[in-house]
Every structure is written in structure tokens, then in C-alpha cells.
Amino acid sequence: MEGAVIAEHISKTYTKGKKVQVGVSDLSFSVNKGELFGLIGPDGAGKTTMFHIFTTLLLADSGNASVDGNDVVKDYKKIRNTIGYMPGRFSLYQDLSVEENLDFFATAFKTTVEANYDLIKEIYVQIEPFKTRRAGQLSGGMKQKLALCCALVHRPTVLFLDEPTTGVDAISRREFWDMLKRLKEQGITILVSTPYMDEANLCDRIALMQQGKILVIDSPADIKKNYKNTLWSVKSNDMFKSLTDLRTFNATISCFSFGDEHHLSLKSDITEEMIINFLKEKGHTDIVVKKVQPNIEDCFMELMSTKTNADTTPNA
Amino acid sequence: MPELVIETKQLTKRFGDFIAADEVTFNVAKGEIFGFLGANGAGKTTVMRMLCGLSMPSSGSATIAGYDIYNETELIKKNIGYMSQKFCLYEDLTVKENITLYGGIYGLSSKVIKNRTETLLQSLGLTSEANNLVKGLPLGWKQKLAFSIAIFHEPKVVFLDEPTGGVDPITRRQFWEMIYETSRKGITVFATTHYMDEAEYCNRVAIMVDGKIEALDSPAGLKQTYNQKTMDDVFYILARKATRKAD
């Protein structure tokens, strides 16, 4: 299979004092050319480790990886010239101004801002009013936009974005994903990571990750289609009590809060009436029960509890 | 009239010409879970720092747990708990040492610390980890431990600054269940978050835009007022109006 970004059986461990920690364990996946591919998972899932390996900043213990057909070990110089990388931590020069940073990155890649201005124009105009301000003095949202411009200024073939929206408010997150969509239309392959499950829906395909392993790789729609159990939305007058009560219902696999409702995952053919009666017996009123389609977070939680040691016991 | 734990009147903070918090007025009752939302730069942190007694207001008034925000900041600090995503625990101390350290800082006697430590470790299922360094714990466990330590001295109110960032969805929900338990014990919870589904778990939610409180109501009330299905959409409508973008 020909992919723009390929990982084959990649493993990496870190030694912290006497402890050996798993970064990633036997990971394989392939991102197609022009695809917007998301690595979705909490901290410690191994997302950043994969970014460091693809961007040739870290050597894997075993396995192979390539970007645009170039091997991450043998051809690392070629890779560094053709990719754009936005690390999770703000890594521009704080003491250089907005335009100086952009110029610097253009020059380092032997090009000019003018040559590829069409690619960054839409994003850059938003920070242009502050072009003489030092990067360190910018707001979070502005820093993020400048970092994206700097990662794009040499017109990379593949863009690596490590948690670009972490800690960013809901409005800026929406804006950022709109920008990604338009970059994708320009034919740039994008590998992006995020801990926000709702952002998964905006990717073509995603890998759900947990503790260095991949739980599943597929399109968001197909992942949702493959949810195994029946999912119900439940409301009652006392939401905290109904949460604990529903967990004692004999057909319950799991029950978790989802905004103003509970998502109740049930085994077999349980009817609406059976759930309502159970809650009535427990003294609940204002009961609303309906079948719902799972979202990515439901799927992640289902896969988490079946495929890995969930992060719920200290020795996991 | 419920007992009020946080009371602010026209609380204002200026940095030069910039008004970070602009006549912010609200009350939070004992045992309430109060969500404090806003885009980056809306002024959440500024207000929170004033309420914790870490920053003097430019004008306006407030009391926290009955103590005055101008003259009794040290008493405020003794009666509140604080936890943020960025700084939780000392990684190079053991679980037990972290608990003892915080208990000591808050002036609890060693006898009280000893008794409460055992109960705490049991309820968290961390007894076997008591003498292990915190850095070896999974992130979700650190967050739960950090929260338990923030309420170890049984404060009147606990401030949580984006407490669930980066944790997996199951742990995130377990964390909120701990928050529920805490509020049932009568401890007021004041929380900021970027997860809009978590706003739904609060009794009431305030949304800050450009230094002002733009809306304050129960999640159901807000959704009705703005005729939206989710808090995410309510937030989007309000925060989109913001004209300033700073951190």
C-alpha cells in the first residue's frame, strides 16, 4: 500500500530512572496522500512519540517508518526539507517579531514568504496587524496561527500538527479546523493529533489510541457503525442518583454522563419500558429514555474497556 | 436564602488601560457546582486569581467563605482548595508524602493527617501505591489524587482550573463523579473547563466575554434562553461576540 506517511511495527520505550515506560508498542498505520488523518487519544497514548519518529527527531527501538517514500532513518535530511511540523509546545523564537519568525523559517528552507504567500495568506492576514509584535507577546490563538504559518511557509507535502488545539477555547478550535479543511483542499497531507474526541469527526480517518496502542483505525462514520452494544440516552429528576442506580441494572455494561443525559450501554434486547420501570422502582421521576447513536467518545470508551487495561486501576 | 460562599459585587481588575475583569457580580451558594466559562482571554483567570486572594481588585467587593477579598486574603487561602491541570503534585515525592506536605501546609495536626490519609488512600484504591513516587502513576490517577489533596483540609470552596485536560474519557467522567460527591458533602466547587459537555454537569454556569459576565444561569436555563440544543452552541453564540483576543 502506498501511503504518504507509513508506520510499520513501530515500538519505542523510554527509561525513566529504573522504570521502563512504553511510548508506543508495535504501531502500524498508513496515511494516504491528501488525507486528513487524526491520532486521537489522551495524554500518554503515544501521539507525540509518533510525531517525533516521523519528523526524524527520535529513533524507534524497532520497526520502520517513512514519509513520502523517504525512510525516517536513512533519508532523514530529505524528510526535514519537505515536511511542516507544528510541535505541541510553542517553539518559535519568542524574541523575534511575527514577520521575523516567518522570514526566518522561509530562509531556513531556502525560499521566501512571497513565493508561497498564497498558501498562508488566509491565516497570515489575521495576524498581520501584529506583525511587528514579538512572538512571545502574542495571545494563545495568535501564536497558534503564527506557528501554522511558519510550518507552511516552505509549502510542505505533509503537515504534522501535534495537539494544535489543546487548551484552546471552543471558538478558536472551530476556526482552526476550518483552516485545516482548506489546507487539505490544497492537496496537503495532514497528520494531526488531539485529545478532544469531538474533533475526530472532522478527520477523513482516525486512529483511536490509548497507552501506546491503537484501539482502532477507520473513518469516524465506520467506527460509530461498529459500536457493539445498544446505546440509550437516559434522563431523570436526580441525575447523580440515576447514574449510580443504572449501574446496578442487570443488563448494564456501562453508564456514563454525557452532558445533560446519561449514555447507558446495554447487552441484550432490553426495552424502553424495562429501563423506565427499573428507574421508577428506584424512585425516579421525569424519566426520559430513548435509543441514541453512539459518538466517537462512546466508541472510545467501549474499546478502552475491552481492548486495554483501562486507566482506572493504579497498576494498569 | 441559601448560605453564600462566594459573593462578588462589581469586581473589577484593570491592568493600565486594559480592563481584564469588568464589574463582575455573582453569588455562589454552599455546595453548588459553579462552572466558569469563557474564551481564552475573556478574564476567567483574572477573576479566579482575585477570588483566591492572589490578586488585589482595582475596585468592587467580594467575600469568599465570609472573608473579605481586600483585608483577609490569608484567611481566604486557608479556607479554599485549588487545583489546576498544569500543576498538581510533586512528582518526586511519594503519594503519602504529597498528602502529608499539603496537610502540613494547611496546618492540620499530624494525627488528623494520619487518619485522613488512610481513609483517602482507601477510597481512591491507592493504598498499595502509598509509598511510590507520584511520577509513576497514570495521569488519570494523578488528577484524582490532586483533587483529593485540594479538598484534604475540607475547605469551604475548591477552585478547579481546567482539571480534566488530557485525560481519557472514562477518567474524565470519574473525575466529575468525585466533584458531585464533594458538592454533596457541602463543599462548593468552582470550575473552569474547555469541555462544553462538562458545563452541563454544573448547577449553574457563568459565561465571560471580554471581561464581563455575559450570561449566568443553569445549563437548562441557558439553552432555553438562547434556544440551543447544547451548551457548546450556547457558548459559541456568546463567545463569538468577543472583540478582544488576548491571553
Image (cartoon, rainbow, N blue to C red):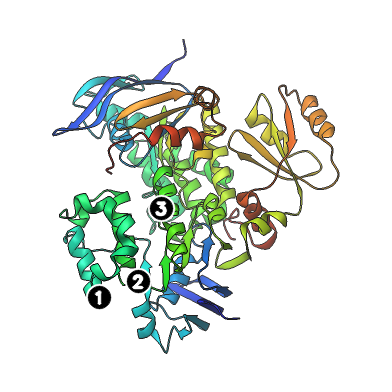
Residue at the farthest bottom position: A74
Residue type pointed to by label 1: Thr
Q: Which residue is mark 3?
A: A176
Can marks 3 and 1 be said to lie on one chain? Answer: yes
Foreground tag (3 vs 1): 1
Residue type pointed to by label 3: Phe
Residue A313 position (above or below residue A151):
above
Can marks 3 and 2 be said to lie on one chain? Answer: yes
Quarter-wise, where is residue B16 in the image?
top left
* Label 3 environment density (alpha carbons within 10 Å; few <14, some 14–19, many ≥20): some
Residue closer to the observer: B180 or A140: A140
Q: Secondary structure at mark 2?
A: loop
Q: Earlier in the sequence, mark 2 or mark 1?
A: 1
Q: Position of residue A165 (x, y in %)?
A: 41, 53
Callouts 3 and 1 close, C-beta under 8 Å: no
Q: Earlier in the sequence, mark 3 or mark 2?
A: 2
Q: Position of residue A112 (x, y in %)?
A: 23, 72
Residue closer to the observer: A225 or A21: A225
Q: Which residue is mark 2?
A: A155
Residue B18 position (above or below residue B130):
above
Q: Earlier in the sequence, mark 3 or mark 1?
A: 1
Callouts 2 and 1 close, C-beta under 8 Å: yes
Q: Secondary structure at mark 3?
A: helix
Q: Position of residue A266 (x, y in %)?
A: 77, 45
Q: Secondary structure at mark 1?
A: loop
Residue B187 position (above or below residue A70):
above
**Protein chain holding label 2:** A
Q: Which residue is mark 1?
A: A111
Give the residue at x 64% y 30%.
A239
Distance between the Cα atoms at labels 3 and 2?
18 Å
Give the residue at x 42% y 68%.
A160
* Label 2 environment density (alpha carbons within 10 Å; few <14, some 14–19, many ≥20): many
